[in-house]
Amino acid sequence: MDLAFLHPLYEHPGPWASVYVDLSHPPEDTPRRRSLTAEAMSEELAGQGTDEATCRAVRNAIEELKNSPEPHGRALFARAGAVVLDPPLARAPRHDRALWAPLPRATPLLDLTGEDAVAVVAYIDRRGADFELRSAVTRERAGSVTGQQWPLHRTGSGEWSERHFQLRVENTWEHNAAEIADALAVCQEETRADLLILVGDDRERRSVHERLPKRLHERVVDARHGAGSRLLDEDVEQARAAHVRRHAEAELERFLAARAADDEGSPRVAEGVPALVEAVREHRVEELVVRPDGGDTHREVWVGEDADQLAVRRTELTILGEQNSWSARVDDALLRAAVATNAPVVSLAPVEAAGERDVPTGGLGALLRLT
């Protein structure tokens, strides 16, 4: 997961208010519920020592969500009387929550916004196609293409002239399939979509699939139901979820392979809080791997003002020359370090086997850069 959008959270010192709001309730009770939520989150932050200006900023931001069409939720990160970042969520949080802490409580975003597969749904017929961009929070038109309009239909006659007409029909279909494939490839490049979901008759889908660039073939999914079916949405969501699961499984296998010692006898992974702290201080984290239900994720470490100022014991930071330090959750401290060094972060939540095998140990691990 690319977490570059989180950079604003680490450009200013804490403490931070981190709030997660569920927006998935029925619309008829939305205005009243949002007002109650705004007041409750503000009071909860105040009880934790948040300054009045920041409480007010959070309360106002939640109030402004009264008419929001977002189907899942919103995260709010605020400090010094202003909301700095408020990303929409791809999944609803289990409950509304608010926390005042030295670091932003950003780790839940790995599962509430992370690995949200983007799909272009192509509604194909013999005349052309309409494209729609789908994600957990997006459903919008993404263009269309119109091919040749005549001739499009076969006849049942066996006369030579009719056979000639049927050949022209075949040529029209092939031409339109090529036009659709070209337009779909451009759409994928512009949107950086993870998936291309083809909706239409078997022959139409197959003709377009065959004409797509080979680099896109692995991204193609055929919808089982047509454009008029109420089950099409389910097809799309299943395809998106399967993509996320496959990606997490591939990252798990990569991590397991790196566990084996390299040619020099050293593993290319770090597991356990002390090893991860050392890897951060040495700037060796290539990729952070998180299993949110891991036993170590809630452990406390000591952090300084810079992302690489991290220690298991406070005295370690003092020895390193850091004058100011605060206690923070280790998962949030590691996330800050990953964002600061542009290291990708992978959540293994979609892979049930990871928890069964305790991979990574304690729920936190890292692939290491070669030295």
Image (tube, grey):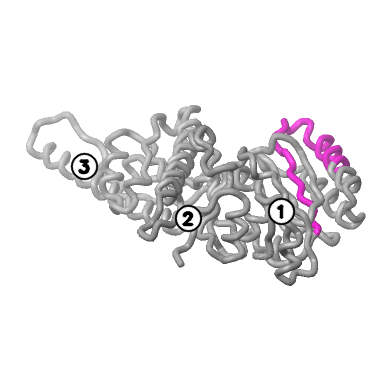
Whether residue 24 appears in magenta in the rendering, the answer is yes
* Position of residue 125 in the picture relative to residue 329 (left or right): left
Residues marked 3 and 2 touching at CB (< 8 Å): no
Q: Give the quadrant of residue 27.
A: top right
Q: Amino acid at mark 2?
A: Thr
Badge 3: how crowded within 10 Å, few (<14), some, or many (20+)?
some
Q: Give the quadrant of residue 35.
A: top right
Q: Magenta stretch?
A: 15-40
Q: Nearer the viewer, residue 233 or 3?
A: 3
Which of pointers 2 and 1 indicates the residue nearer the eye?
1
Picture coordinates of residue 367, whole percent (x, y): 49, 55
Residue on which disc 3 sits: 169
In the rendered image, the vertical position of residue 91 relative to residue 76, given as above or below:
above
How far apart marks 3 and 2 lie (CA) works out to 33 Å
Q: Residue furthest left?
A: 160
Q: Nearer the viewer, residue 348 or 198?
A: 348
Residue on which disc 1 sits: 301
* Mark nearer the N terminus (3 vs 2): 3
* Position of residue 85 in the picture relative to residue 196 (left or right): right
Q: Residue at x 85, y 60 (%)?
A: 81
Whether residue 307 appears in magenta in the rendering, the answer is no
Picture coordinates of residue 80, whole percent (x, y): 84, 62
Q: Taking the image as drawn, is residue 260 in sight?
A: yes
Picture coordinates of residue 323, whole percent (x, y): 79, 69
Residue on which disc 2 sits: 191
Q: Residue at x 59, y 48 (%)?
A: 272
Q: Amino acid at mark 3?
A: Val
Residues marked 2 and 1 touching at CB (< 8 Å): no
